[in-house]
Image: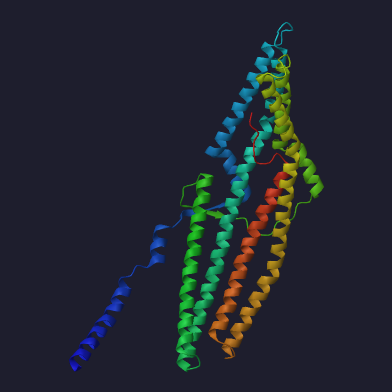
Amino acid sequence: MKKKLITALALCLSVSMATPALAVAATDVPAAIASNMTFEGSPVKISLQQAYDKFIADSSVMTGIKYQKDGELLTAQGLSESVHALSNPNAPDTTSKNLLKVERDFAKEVVEPNYEARVNAQKLTIFETYYNVKNAEENMKIQKENLDIEKELLKNASLKLKLGTISNMEYLTAEAAEKTAEDNYLSALNTLRTAKMGFNRLLGYGVMTNTSLSDKLTEVALPKETFAETLAAAKEKNLSVKKAAYDLRCAEENLKIYNAYPKSSIKYRTAYLKMLSAQTANENAPLTLEMDIRSKYMAMMEAYQQVQTYKTTVANAAEAARLAQLQFNAGMCTITDVQQAQLGSTQAKLGQSAALLKYNLAVENYKLCSGYGTAAADL
């Protein structure tokens, strides 16, 4: 029996002696990531407007958009030539000529709006990507602040443990919270790195270029235009509405081509049904657009309200964390109470940053409603 006890003690001793060696051999993950994920060179400061300008000036995507515009100009030119070829008064197929005129006029009309809509779509992507980086930066700062607080709390817990004013369990709780805060900070840092790499790639920089985004993630003003003004402008300019009206005109001209056919013929009935379908789509297009704008308006106002609410939430949570710390220092509450209050403060700050991002994106989306939008019309 004594021999078994000695053997067991020797085994425990060997395990305990091996543990430090294992800890030393363990990889320092944050240091390993940092050594391979360092953004290179001097900081390249860039505002949102500068990001737009750079994209328009030298982006391969922008080059493609310009080629699309050139292609649509050629389409319009080709249709003009076809109409000219049928301009002879003796030309028998006048209905085809009228259809070509409708196609030509629409092609000419939407070349510039299509170009602007495609640019708007890319600018919206840049806007979102830019402020995703700023949101990631803010989240990283919040998690770093939380980590610093947890480190200080652990330091205080260590002193209190030596003085015998807290239990060993409370100290272990503080130690676990500090490790969790470390993990959260590393996660936030990696999220920022990923967002920054995505931004660099979008703007045509090297993936690890040390870009520094100079604009801040702050609350933008609500649009000055009234909802009625935005809706009226959208119905006048929106390309989906213009396309539906164009499709109807084409269908009407196409039906005229088959007017001489028997009303029971397949060709006439097919053209007639196509016209009815286009008529329905043309009637629904403004209603669909209005629903979309109203939805974006509600999303914007809801996001605005959330931003206002978070101002109070963050202030209250920060005060609760401050009071909990004072109570803990005075021995009036446990370390768990402090950690819960600090967690509430951190979550409130993270929520506020996310709400700001959501609101700013909602405003940008809504603003684009009053113009040509972000979707080009097919020719």
Q: What colour scheme governs how the chains and residues are painted in the rendered image of this protein?
A: rainbow
Residue 33 x %, y %: 41, 61
Residue under the image location 30 percent in, 74 percent down:
22
In the displayed orientation, state which residue is furthest to the left.
3
Let me know if residue 241 appears in the view.
yes
Residue 119 x %, y %: 63, 39
Q: Which sits in the foreground, 234 or 44?
A: 234
Residue under the image location 54 percent in, 38 percent down:
61
The N terminus - image quarter: bottom left
The C terminus - image quarter: top right
Residue under the image location 75 percent in, 44 percent down:
290
**Depicted 111 relative to depicted 179: above or below:** above
Residue under the image location 56 percent in, 68 percent down:
142
Q: How many labels, in total?
A: 0
**Depicted 240 relative to depicted 91: above or below:** below
In the displayed orientation, state which residue is furthest to the top.
90
Q: Is residue 122 left or right of residue 186?
A: right
**Depicted 36 relative to depicted 206: above or below:** below
Quadrant housing residue 230 = top right
Q: Is residue 149 left or right of residue 351?
A: left
Q: Is residue 29 left or right of residue 266?
A: left
Q: Which sits in the foreground, 274 or 206?
A: 274
Residue 66 x %, y %: 59, 32
Quadrant housing residue 237 = top right
Quadrant housing residue 255 = top right
**Depicted 314 relative to depicted 208: above or below:** below
Residue 140 x %, y %: 53, 64
Let me know if residue 101 appears in the view.
no
